[in-house]
Amino acid sequence: MAARKTGKTLNLSAVLDLNEATMLRDKLVSLRGNDLAIDASAVERVGALSAQVLIAAAKTWDQDKLAFTFSKVSDAFQKTMQLIGVDIHHLLAKEIRQ
């Protein structure tokens, strides 16, 4: 059995629109097999497709029994996710949960 790889951090772009969704998916696929911390502190705008990509990734990491957390989130990111009905509270790092 292969040893678990070290944790990685993925810094999200400021704009997560339709064009970014495919690149986001590709970045996530390349990081599969590692514990992953998502830094969404620079996010200013989130499209529904990018949100869907992130939630699908969270489920994939959960199935792989690896950590998938949001280490930092901007207000815009958090508010947009709430607005479109996506609850990420359980994925937030303990330090930023309210």
Image (cartoon, helix red, strand yellow):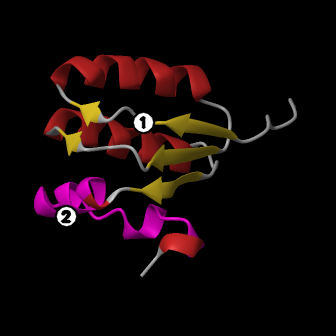
Residue for point 27% across, 25% down: 21
**Foreground residue among 1 and 56:** 56
- Residue 46 in the image: state x and y as whole percent: 21, 42
Labels 1, 2: front one: 1
Cα–Cα gap, marks 1 and 2: 18 Å
Stretch in magenta? 76-94
Q: Is residue 92 magenta?
A: yes
Q: Quadrant of residue 73?
A: bottom left
Residue 9 in the magenta stretch? The answer is: no
For residue 70, above or below residue 15: below
Q: Which residue is identified by label 1? A: 12
Residue shown at 19%/64% (left/top)?
Answer: 82
The main secondary structure of the magenta stretch is helix
Question: Residue 17: x, y in percent?
Answer: 19, 29
Counting from the top left corner in percent of width and height, residue 26 is at 44, 17
Is label 1 in a helix, a strand or a loop? loop
How busy is the neighbourhood of tag 1: few (under 14 within 10 Å), some, or many (20 plus)? Answer: some
Q: What residue is drawn where x is 44% and y is 47%?
A: 58
Quadrant into which the N terminus falls: top right
Amino acid at dot 1: Leu
User: Which residue bears the numbered disc 2?
Assistant: 82
SS at mark 2 in the image? helix
